Amino acid sequence: MPEATAPLPTQPSSAPHPGSAPAPWTQRYATLGDDFVATLEPSPLPAPYWVGCNDALATQLGLAADWAASDVLLNTFTGNQLPDGGAQTASVYSGHQFGVWAGQLGDGRACALGELSGHEVQLKGAGPTPYSRRGDGRAVLRSSIREFLCSEAMHALGVPTTRALCVTGSDAQVWREERETAAVVTRVAQSFVRFGHFEHFSHSQQHAQLRTLTDYVIEHFYPECRSAVGEDGPYVALLQAVTGRTAEMVAHWQSVGFCHGVMNTDNMSILGLTLDYGPFQFLDGYDPAHICNHSDHQGRYAFHKQPNVAYWNLFCLGQALMPLLGEQEHAIAALETFKARYPQALAARMAAKLGFAQAHENQRPLIESGLKLLAQERVDFTIFWRRLSHWAEGMDGANSSVRDLFVDRAAADAWLAEFRALHAQDATFNGATTSQRMLRTNPKFVLRNHLGELAIRAAKTKDFSVLHQLQTVLADPFAEHTAFEDWAGFAPDWASSIEISCSS
Ligand code: AMP
Ligand code: MG
């Protein structure tokens, strides 16, 4: 790595200094006070090194083009030193884990540094906090790489998500099932407030703090709720807005085959962002009941249960907000909007995947029969949609690479005929335009478990080239990237032996 460059500027400056963060780092959530956050001392990791950097996000945050050449920033993003105007704070929250009230949790291995350009910057794995309970406050290289790659892959797919700025590593040892090395992933979001923050202040009867938190969230992130009429109007409006965003997020997940793995209420973002990448997985073969988390023995968070779990989690949020709401009916009415919002959002996504300009009731049988067929044969979810997108151009029955995905060719042909017939109802149908539209909706590349594993294996030998290539490909998952054809192929047999659990 290049030599250390200038220290962080202490005064705001219009032009970023080479290799340094522009001032000022600001504090927002931390200003709510001691009931909300604990201030930490840095817990340094020895001899940190860069594992991965996200220049596009760095630019958005206002960092200089050569930010990754700065040893000051390397140490800042490893948690070894504080930026000027920054601090390390951990926030307290509680939550329901696997359907059971878990009591106080909190940022056990995450700390906020402050904000850059209106975005909160958080380090994950930077050491113990007052909320670490029996944990070591660390994250391992493997899970940090997965979070780094996946949050950016999701962003490129258009799925609402927290972002990832960088991963730094250290040879410091961390014990999990085996000996591993420590890493820190720097995450970025407008806010990392979770449903669990509201549950915390509600269950502990700290109703003044609950109101402060809720007003803070409305003020900064849901200003449109402020003007809702009635004493509890803004709070009801917030619950409804969060319900809508959560419904949209989960519909997006279902449409790209993303399985979160640990939808505990403490992992649910109040902004409707995909948050806390742990044992997640993109589906390979389509199995609606797929459980990606090896710690989830009951399958509570199986792929097809995600919409209902989101709804359940929203009820926990509604319950937590009750001290601020006049009538229970107000909360229920806001929450019930999920029942219309989610199917609408999913229908819109599925219509786009099928190449229709908008959703229509007459697409439903086609969607249902298509998913049933995929499930029966465990057909690769991503490859199916991509091949269908190409096929849509000519809709030629012969030599179809889509039908080759199925053992039951007759059933595949029948479904494709149904698909063609529905498009044919549109007098303005154009195969080339439809195909192009579908290719911009159905990605060629998703972060399959085995792809992440390839990057991790290489990174363990300090070879970060696979990670960097994957980063480039996943940043534009709809492009062909013909040099990386293998990464668009079926998961190899060894992929099924990758075990991902909560303990990373
Ligand atoms: P998660 O399963 O990652 O959502 O974490 C659930 C809770 O455990 C959160 O409060 C985390 O901050 C905490 N936690 C997870 N891993 C660790 C760790 N290695 N050290 C301290 N706390 C942790
Ligand atoms: Mg979590």
Image (cartoon, rainbow, N blue to C red):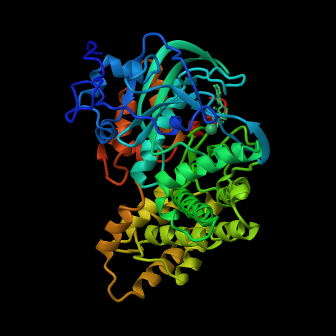
Residue at 51 percent across and 56 percent down: it is 256
For this orientation, the residue located farthest to the top is 46
Residue at 47 percent across and 64 percent down: it is 224
Estimate the x, y position of residue 145 in percent, counting from the top left. Answer: 48, 31
The image quadrant where one finds ligand 2 is top right
Q: Quadrant of the N terminus?
A: top left
- 115 left or right, relative to 138: left
Residue 37 found in image quarter: top right
Residue 458 found in image quarter: top left
Residue at 70 percent across and 42 percent down: it is 200
Closer-to-camera residue (383/500): 500
Closer-to-camera residue (129/234): 234
Estimate the x, y position of residue 452 in percent, counting from the top left. Answer: 49, 36
Estimate the x, y position of residue 127 in percent, counting from the top left. Answer: 57, 20
Residue 462 visible to the viewer: yes
Residue 8 found in image quarter: top left
Residue 309 visible to the viewer: no
- 252 left or right, relative to 438: right
Closer-to-camera residue (490/58): 58
Residue at 62 percent across and 44 percent down: it is 267
Closer-to-camera residue (429/134): 134
- 242 left or right, relative to 77: right
Estimate the x, y position of residue 36 in percent, counting from the top left. Answer: 61, 36
Number of marks present in the image shown: 0
User: Eyeballing the image, is 65 above or below 128?
Assistant: below
User: Eyeballing the image, is 172 above or below 252?
Assistant: above
- 328 left or right, relative to 502: right
Q: Quadrant of the C terminus?
A: top right
